[in-house]
Amino acid sequence: MYFYSGKYSRNTLFFDYPLLGSLFLFIIGGFGIHFAMRDAALARAEKTTEASVTQYRSTAGTRSRRQYNLANSSVEYRCSYNFSVDGESYSRTGYISEHSVDDSIKAELQKHTDVPLKFSATVYYDSLNPSISSLTEFGVESENQYRIAGLVIGSGLVLIVLVALGAVLTASNKNGNGGIIVDAKGTVIYPEEVDAGRQGSADNPTKIGFL
């Protein structure tokens, strides 16, 4: 049994997994760019109206998430909201930023209680299709999506760079070994010895007879 240390084997699958991870990150980043472009287009036809918002709190804590941007971070609270456009009513769920409400509402949102909190807030909707709406400006949503997509795609590029560096190091080790073969007992066999053995086998082939 021989282990050939000077040539790539299918153990290069070690490098395939990070590449697959990079591809996955690129796909996720592509979806992020798609949604960012959609929100940017919606921002151009954006209109506003007042919505009735309900935030369901509990003693276990409010349902919230933290949104990051380049300047700062903010907490967004999950809620349901209702609004009307041209006499037609719409009911949606979404997140409202702590920066979109005054200090008194913000303090109430942070309380742990089973009593729902009701308040008014601005809703942003597509003038061509009011069923598409948000409690955050579409332009801001677009910027957030672009930011997240950039981070995801950047992570994929970092993985590719790491794989490339790994391949370079492996190639360096290959050149350093000079094609040395190590058998199962740990005996080092040099390339010229292997070539001599192969040449001897070629000069004296084994003859097999049939009875």
Image: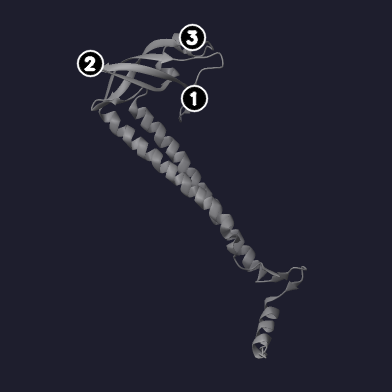
Mark 3–mark 2 Cα distance, whole angstroms, equals: 30 Å
Towards the viewer: 199 or 82: 82
Counting residues from the N terminus, which is met first, the one under dot 3 or under dot 1?
1
Residue 29, image x, y percentages: 43, 42
User: Residue 57, relative to residue 204: is it above or below?
Assistant: above
**Helix, strand or loop at disc 2?**
loop
Residue 180, image x, y percentages: 68, 71
Residue wearing tag 1: 65
Count residues near mark 2 (Cα–Cα under 10 Å), then give few for <14, some for 14-19, many for 20+. few
Residue under the point 38% across and 32% down: 143
Residue 157 seen by the camera:
no
Residue under the point 44% across and 15% down: 55
Counting residues from the N terminus, which is met first, the one under dot 2 or under dot 1?
1
Residue farthest to the left? 86
Residue wearing tag 2: 87
Count residues near mark 1 (Cα–Cα under 10 Å), then give few for <14, some for 14-19, many for 20+. some
50 left or right of 6?
Answer: left
Residue under the point 58% across and 60% down: 12
Residue type pointed to by label 2: Gly
52 left or right of 45?
Answer: right
In what quadrant of the picture does the N terminus appear? Answer: bottom right
Residue wearing tag 3: 115
